[in-house]
């Protein structure tokens, strides 16, 4: 693993664009033995090898626009959605693009940075980099950051399944981590997203993010998963991150391949939503919208 800390200390005084530019070069070199996400496949993406995310050396975007459907304190946001993901959530609302790292248009970092700057000038409050999952395209994400204004408020929207290498590359570059905590146990993560050892990885990343940026944790309440997923997620957050902002989202829609799972063929009931809120309030979670 390449040591990043000395570089970070030398460049911190140079401003975010310079730091991001240097880290982008390191991140691209790391694609020769890719371990950016917690799968740590170790494939040589520079040579055309494909790991579990199927991503190559170059990234695509399937959306880049001002959006207003995120947390109230972050919107309007200029959201840049990179194609492809390291998880395989059957209920993914953008599954076709999120699963396909070649979807959309090839990224042009300078053009995206110019569009983001224009959006900020027109009233956008933040710039958000998301996916799919942006961690698998970290070199490109950092190249985009290198072109953004140094004073822009940047949001890293993530599934929190990145590796320690990825965390080191991201350290200090984003004011806000907006992180999903999807599953409360590894069995549900394995069955619904094809991902083993999920809970431990996400917890580690959330604890790190809380110490290095502002952290907002999202949980999408799924039908039939209140006790197995939301309840343990809420309990862990209350015990380990009691002051963190939590957005409990109840607007589940049976998208993509959700029908493969009988409990995910409908929406969340009013009773489930009420119980989920009771759990959150009973634990004193810092709920936001």
Image (spheres, rainbow, N blue to C red):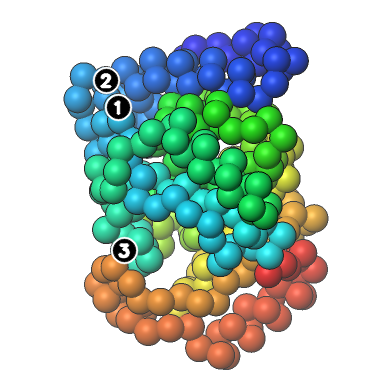
Q: Is residue 135 above or below residue 68?
A: above
Element at badge 3?
A: loop
Element at badge 2?
A: helix
In front: 205, or 65? 65
User: Which of pointers 2 and 3 lies earlier in the amino acid sequence?
Assistant: 2
Q: Residue at x 63, y 83 (%)?
A: 275
Residue 246 - label = none
In front: 73, or 235? 73
Residue 46 - label = 2
Q: CA distance from mark 3 to mark 1?
A: 25 Å
Give the left or right position of residue 14, taking residue 268 as reference: right
Q: CA distance from mark 2 to mark 3?
A: 29 Å
Q: Can the viewer see residue 140?
A: yes
Residue 37: percent from left, percent from top: 42, 35
Pointer 1 residue: 57
Give the left or right position of residue 248, taking residue 24 as reference: right
Q: Residue at x 54, y 61 (%)?
A: 67
Q: Can the viewer see residue 164?
A: no
Foreground mark, 2 or 3, reads: 2
Disc 2 + disc 1, Cβ < 8 Å: yes
User: Which of pointers 2 and 1 lies earlier in the amino acid sequence?
Assistant: 2
Q: Residue at x 70, y 81 (%)?
A: 278
Element at badge 1?
A: loop
Q: Quadrant of residue 260?
A: bottom left
Residue 238: percent from left, percent from top: 74, 60
User: Which of pointers 3 and 1 lies earlier in the amino acid sequence?
Assistant: 1
Residue 61: percent from left, percent from top: 36, 45
Q: Is residue 154 above or below residue 273?
A: above
Give the left or right position of residue 270, taking residue 149 as reference: left
Residue 90 - label = 3
In which quadrant is the C terminus drawn? bottom right
């Amino acid at each position: 693993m390449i040591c990043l800390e000395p570089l970070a200390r030398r460049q911190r005084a140079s401003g975010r664009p310079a730091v991001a530019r240097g880290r982008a070069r390191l991140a691209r070199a790391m694609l020769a033995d890719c371990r950016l996400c917690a799968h740590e496949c170790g494939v040589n993406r520079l040579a055309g090898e494909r790991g579990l995310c199927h991503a190559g050396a170059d990234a695509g975007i399937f959306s880049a626009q001002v959006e207003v459907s995120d947390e109230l304190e972050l919107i309007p946001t200029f959201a840049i959605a990179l194609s492809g993901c390291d998880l395989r959530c059957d209920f993914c609302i953008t599954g076709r693009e999120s699963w396909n790292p070649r979807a959309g248009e090839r990224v042009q970092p300078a053009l995206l940075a110019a569009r983001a700057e224009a959006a900020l000038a027109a009233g956008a409050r933040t710039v958000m980099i998301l996916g799919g999952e942006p961690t698998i395209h970290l070199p490109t994400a950092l190249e985009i950051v290198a072109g953004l204004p140094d004073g822009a408020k940047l949001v890293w929207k993530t599934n929190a399944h990145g590796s320690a290498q990825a965390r080191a590359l991201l350290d200090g570059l984003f004011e806000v981590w907006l992180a999903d905590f999807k599953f409360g146990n590894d069995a549900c993560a394995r069955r619904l997203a094809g991902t083993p050892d999920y809970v431990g990885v996400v917890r580690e990343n959330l604890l790190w993010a809380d110490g290095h940026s502002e952290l907002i944790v999202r949980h999408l309440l799924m039908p039939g998963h209140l006790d197995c997923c939301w309840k343990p997620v809420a309990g862990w957050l209350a015990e380990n991150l009691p002051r963190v902002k939590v957005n409990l989202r109840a607007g589940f829609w049976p998208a993509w391949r959700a029908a493969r799972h009988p409990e995910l063929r409908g929406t969340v009931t009013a009773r489930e939503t009420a119980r989920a809120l009771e759990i959150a309030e009973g634990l004193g979670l810092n709920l936001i919208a």
